[in-house]
Image (cartoon, rainbow, N blue to C red):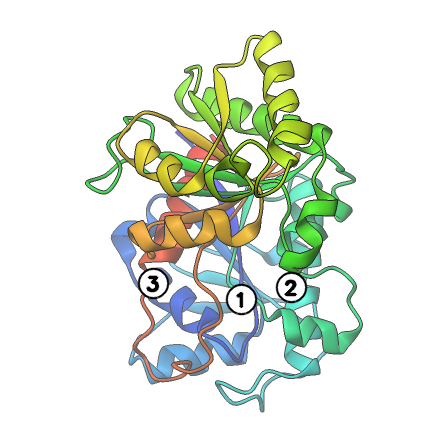
């Protein structure tokens, strides 16, 4: 089988992105799974490899036609005009935000043009993005805009393993994403909940060819306790679940989140629809921080990412764990096939 071509974006170069990319490329056996091209600064990647005492056969790609050199070399393409060579680890700035954005946009265009089979993104800094004037708060929203998709979702996916009893792993899709908690209730609507149910269903059918068992989380404690703590469950969430059930989806809810995740981890559900960011992220990252993979559902291209952030506090120290990047690459390989 032909190895998929994957673009590894460097993310914010002041974070641990360059380090985890270098560590992945240094694993010859792992790199047999795919053909990589790094989208980012060649100088920053060389600096990271030098700090790690890794000898990487890097070749600068001057154009899109040179992305994939000889088999024993890794192509690095820098599509950004921003000079980040003097950026020190742990010091994000407007420069690092703009460069990270440029890397992402270039990778998206390569994927849409069919020149690569998927994108695996190292973490960016939302604060650095904001300094550049970029309106979107993160990867997911930028990907959706560039791909022209209004129906999309962030999925945190934990593959099968000792932490999850289900045979298909556990995926959590989010109805709302990068917004203040106070804005979540007003942002919920039945259409968005139904869309996330459908996207979860499509994802599990795609990778496992099985009808998934999906549960939808309540927004309020005790699922609102019959209106004592809020009425979003009866007014918005339950009707959306019932409409999905009428379409034949194996879905239940709303279920209080304090018991739902426990039941899902025990193998009762394959997928969970969470109402907001931390409702899903805290649970999955607590279960297995380094194996959880971020996937953007609903796109015409493959995009995955490790679930960790930029970790500016440890950037440049050589101690970043690259296993999350490896998990994201493995899933991108699977999805691209």
Identified at 56% across, 41% down, the residue is 219
Residue 254, position as x, y percentages in the image: 52, 29
* Residue 216 image offset from top left, x and y in percent: 51, 30
Most distant residue in the front direction: 228
Please report contact status of discs 1 and 2: CB closer than 8 Å, yes or no: yes
Specify which label sits upstream in the sequence, 1 or 3. Answer: 1
Residue closer to the observer: 33 or 259: 259
Q: Position of residue 156 (x, y in %)?
A: 46, 45
Position of residue 59 measured from the top left corner of the image (x, y, whole percent): 50, 68
Which residue sits at x=49%, y=49%? 279
Spot the residue most to the left.
162
Q: Which residue is mark 2?
A: 103
**Residue 49 sits in which quadrant?**
bottom left
Identify the residue position indicated by label 3 in the image. Answer: 322
Pointers 2 and 3 in contact (C-beta within 8 Å): no
State how far apart marks 2 and 3 are (Cα): 20 Å
Q: Residues within 10 Å of mark 3 (few under 14, many from 20)?
A: some
Where does label 1 land, which residue? 10
| Mark 1 nearby-residue class (10 Å; few <14, some 14–19, many ≥20) | many
Q: Is residue 6 above or below residue 190?
A: below
Q: Residue at x 74, y 59 (%)?
A: 136
Secondary structure found at label 2? helix
- Give the class, few, some or many, for how many residues have Cα within 10 Å of label 2's Cα (few <14, many ≥20): many
Left or right of residue 171: residue 189: right
Task: Say which mark, if any, is on residue 319.
Answer: none
What residue is shown at x 57% (from left), y 26% (from top)?
197
- Lower sequence index among marks 2 and 3: 2
The first of marks 1 and 2 along the sequence is: 1
On screen, 78 above or below 213? below
Instruction: Please tell me in which quadrant of the rendered image residue 152 appears.
Output: top right
Q: Is residue 328 above or below residue 181?
A: above
């Amino acid at each position: 089988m032909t190895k998929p071509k994957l673009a590894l974006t460097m993310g914010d170069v002041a974070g641990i992105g360059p380090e985890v990319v270098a560590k992945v490329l240094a694993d010859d056996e792992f790199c047999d799974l795919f053909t990589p091209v790094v989208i980012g600064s060649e100088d920053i990647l060389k600096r990271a490899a030098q700090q790690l005492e890794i000898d990487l056969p890097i070749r600068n790609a001057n154009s899109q036609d040179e992305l994939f050199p000889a088999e024993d070399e890794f192509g690095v393409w820098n599509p950004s005009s921003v000079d980040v060579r003097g950026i020190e680890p742990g010091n994000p700035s407007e420069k690092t935000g703009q460069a990270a954005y440029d890397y992402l946009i270039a990778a998206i265009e390569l994927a849409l043009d069919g020149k690569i089979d998927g994108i695996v993104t190292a973490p960016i800094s939302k604060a650095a993005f904001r300094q550049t004037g970029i309106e979107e708060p993160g990867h997911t929203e930028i990907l959706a805009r560039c791909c022209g998709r209004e129906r999309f979702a962030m999925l945190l996916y934990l593959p099968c393993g000792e932490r999850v009893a289900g045979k298909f792993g556990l995926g959590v899709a989010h109805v709302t994403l990068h917004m203040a908690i106070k804005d979540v209730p007003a942002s919920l609507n039945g259409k968005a909940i139904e869309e996330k149910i459908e996207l979860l269903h499509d994802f599990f059918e795609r990778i496992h060819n099985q009808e998934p068992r999906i549960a939808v989380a309540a927004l309020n404690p005790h699922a609102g306790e019959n209106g004592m703590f809020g009425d979003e469950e009866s007014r918005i969430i339950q009707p959306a679940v019932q409409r999905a059930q009428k379409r034949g989806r194996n879905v239940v809810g709303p279920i209080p989140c304090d018991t739902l995740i426990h039941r899902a981890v025990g193998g009762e559900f394959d997928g969970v629809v969470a109402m907001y960011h931390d409702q899903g992220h805290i649970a999955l990252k607590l279960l297995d921080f380094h194996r959880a993979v971020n996937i953007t559902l609903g796109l015409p291209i493959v995009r995955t990412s490790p679930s960790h952030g930029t970790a500016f506090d440890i950037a440049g120290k050589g101690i970043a764990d690259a296993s999350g990047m490896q998990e994201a690459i493995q899933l991108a390989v699977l999805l691209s096939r």
